[in-house]
Image (cartoon, rainbow, N blue to C red):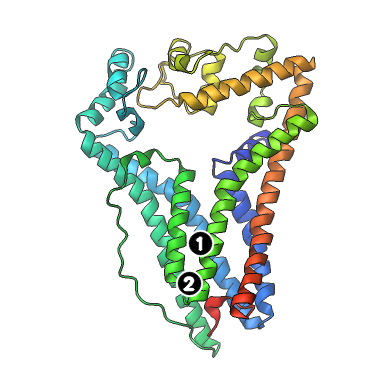
Amino acid sequence: MSYINIISAVGNNRGIAPLFVRDCCIEIPSKLGLTYNQNLKDSRQMANNAVRERFIDEYGTSAIWMGGPVLLGKLANKVIKKLGYNAGVNMSLFKERNNQGIKYNIEKFREKAPEAVKDLEKALLNKNKYQKLQAGKFALTTAIPIVLMGFILPKLNFKLTEKIKEKQGANAGRKTDAINNEVSFKGLASTMANMSNVNKMAVTDGGLTIGRVWTARNRYEQMELGFKNAMMMFLNFVFPIYLAKGLDKLSLKLFKTDVNLDPKLMNDENFLSAIKDNKIKMPSKREDIIDFLDKNPDSNFSKLCEEYCGVKYLKNRVRDPREFVDTKKIFSFSKEIEKFSSEARKSGNIEKYSKLAVKIKSANIAANVGISSFLLAVVLPEVIFLLRKKVTGSDAEPGLLS
């Protein structure tokens, strides 16, 4: 993978890559060091126990958190396929619109994409069953990670600590009551099946917080875990998006350079050539987007939408009727292309403008990851340590206090 592709992936705050970099490569190693030093103020034994628990907890949770929804989603799709359905039929199509919807697409693509239409017809004919299958898929891809991360992993981790502390001659630690409560998913909206993996991770994060607070060994550990997980959700899923927007706006003011597009696109020679030759034709209105994509499948803009906006085409370059077209996202994307193209031409040297834009965008992405990671890995733990000392009067992990 090239440098630009890596920067592009890390800069996509709606993808998994920035979460992986912040979580596994920066935040957890830093937390382990801070945890050891903080608990060392109590004793070396306390520090070793705290770091072991934190290592298992953090990396075990990250593995389930990032890989769980993806792997379970693939498993669910195989089950749905065995039952005779194509899980790729987007649930948003059940709501009919002026230019797309499951019935609309069946009629429009009956001759152009007969196999895809069969999938649509099967889903429409068995609408309730298909919606239940998709709702079940959502439940599977979120409930299992929540149970594993929020309930099973901490229980096993605590049991391990109890056994080790027994060998160390320390108190066995407080026992926790068995959990007999069942998680209910009644009333789960089937439309949630269209959530991205990152959105599912956000949902599992919420479930993780509930699970961790529930399984905490005492009320001080409950308070600390509740605060920590709530702040982590904010710093992982909300703050980076707004920080990225702020940095890009600041760059426009300081350097007179528009950097809102993906760095991979701004570095694309074909894209720059199309700008220079004014060959990027785009629909002027949002309501014309679908018609444009269908009539111009091989146009520069359609191919860009395919790569950056989730538009899918079949092998014969007919748009996949099973997929929902997010015209709002595409129209916003077209405006960003328009703005970048205009500014690049005004500069008098499109290539030079592009190189500067890529450098600035790369710096913004690095700054975003650095600032977010610093808040997660250094500031948040220090705030927790201060609150812990103030509330419990001890530097040790609340759950390890006998």
Residue 313 relative to residue 186: left or right = right
User: Outermost residue, left direction?
Assistant: 125
Residue 263 relative to residue 225: left or right = right
In what quadrant of the picture does the N terminus appear? top right
- Residue at 63%, 30% in the rendered image: 262
**Which residue position is annotated with label 2?**
157
On screen, residue 360 above or below 75: above
Is the residue under label 2 in contact with that under label 1 (CB below 8 Å)? Answer: yes
| Quarter of the figure with residue 183 | bottom left
On screen, residue 273 above or below 84: above
Q: For numbered disc 1, what is the local secondary structure?
A: helix
| Rendering coords of residue 402 (x, y %) | 53, 85
Sort mark 2 into few (<14), some (14-19) or many (20+) by Cα contacts within 10 Å.
some
Q: Amino acid at mark 2?
A: Asn
Q: Amino acid at mark 1?
A: Gly
| Quarter of the figure with residue 168 | bottom right
- Residue at 34%, 74% in the rendered image: 178
Q: For numbered disc 2, what is the local secondary structure?
A: helix
Residue 203 relative to residue 230: left or right = left
User: Outermost residue, bottom direction?
Assistant: 169
| Rendering coords of residue 392 (x, y %) | 59, 79
**Which residue position is annotated with label 1?**
60
Question: Which is nearer the N-term, disc 1 or disc 2?
Answer: 1
Identify the mark at residue 270; answer none if there is no mark: none
Looking at this view, is 52 or 129 the one in front?
Answer: 129
| Quarter of the figure with residue 87 | top left
Task: Give the Cα separation between the discs numbered 1 and 2.
Answer: 10 Å
- Residue at 31%, 44% in the rendered image: 135
